[in-house]
Image (tube, helix red, strand yellow):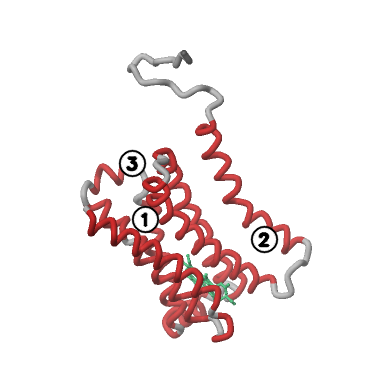
Amino acid sequence: MHSQSVNKEGAVAKPVLSPARFLKPLVFIVALLPAVFAVYGVANSQYVDPVESLLKITGEWGLRFLLITLCVTPVQIIFKWVGVAKLRRMLGLFAFFYATMHLAIWVVLDQGLDLQEAVNAIVEKKFITLGITVWVGLLVLAVTSNRWSVRKLGRKWKSVHNSVYVLTVLAVVHFVWQVKASELLEPTAYLGALAVLLVWRFMRMVKR
Ligand code: HEM
């Protein structure tokens, strides 16, 4: 029989070369690739309008990572893959990372660091107001995603982090609000994916 090593606490130690050990660093590298390709694209003048392209790339990856993070629990339950939960925090932080890059590109490159102009846009343009609202929400989730906050907030922690569903809905609305009628296909696809995730969650709640 295959023998497993047991540490002092009696827990079964993971084999040194277990695939689980490589999963987190691998996902980290893969999640960084969109940012690397975007920088490469700018450096090689691949975009006609680099600021617009960077806004699109970072905005979409922010939204994609939000949706990917919401897939963790369904994947865990449907495929009985407990270990996938270990990726949840990192995936959520990547959503925040891309959303922050999106905001930084808008403030620095699009608004030319004119803070008065940026504040005016936040107040006057509804889709920007919504974008900022989503970003502030993601900031709260990122700051409270550590073990210390889980302990401090107790039962409240789950309610705070369940707001990720509302933030994802608002991020899709932010997307829909600024695209032309002829470009609605893509945001509709994200909306469809989100609807499936919400229905799945609702059905589980009813079952329980
Ligand atoms: C933080 C405040 C935010 C500001 C100021 C902002 C601003 C913008 C702007 C100006 C655009 C239009 C880009 C274009 O020219 O086509 C845009 C698009 C977009 N934003 Fe935001 N946004 C914010 C937050 C967010 C957040 C938090 C998300 C999602 C996590 C997000 C996701 C998107 C998406 C998906 C698009 C559409 C990209 C496309 O056209 O393909 N934004 N945003």
Q: Provide the secondary structure element on which disc 3 rests.
A: helix
| Disc 1 target residue | 141
Image x and y of residue 17, in percent: 56, 25
Q: How far, Cα to Cα, is label 3 from label 1?
A: 12 Å
Q: Is mark 2 within 8 Å of ligand 1?
A: no
Q: Where is mark 2, residue-wise? A: 38
Q: Residue at x 38, y 66 (%)?
A: 167
| Badge 3 density bin: few <14, some 14–19, many ≥20, Cα 10 Å | few
Image location (x, y in percent) of residue 30: 60, 48
Q: Which mark is residue 147?
A: 3
Asked whether residue 123 is in view, the answer is yes
The residue at the point 40 percent across, 60 percent down is: 138
161 relative position to 52: left or right: left
Decide if ligand 1 comes within 8 Å of the CB at mark 3.
Answer: no
| Residue nearest the viewer, comparing 153 with 34 | 34
Query: Does residue 184 lie above or below 57 as drawn?
Result: below
Tag 3: residue type?
A: Arg
Task: Please report whichever mark, 1 or 2, sits nearer to the chain's N-terminal start.
Answer: 2
Distance from the alpha carbon under mark 1 to that under mark 2:
26 Å
Q: Is residue 96 visible?
A: no
In the structure shown, which secondary structural element does the residue marked by tag 2 occupy? helix
Q: Are marks 3 and 1 in contact (CB under 8 Å)?
A: no
Disc 1 marks a residue whose amino acid type is Leu
Image location (x, y in percent) of residue 148 = 31, 42
Q: Amino acid at mark 2?
A: Ala
Point 67% across, 60% down: residue: 38
Task: Give whichever of discs 3 and 1 has the lower sequence position.
Answer: 1
- At 48% across and 15% down in the image, what residue appears? 2
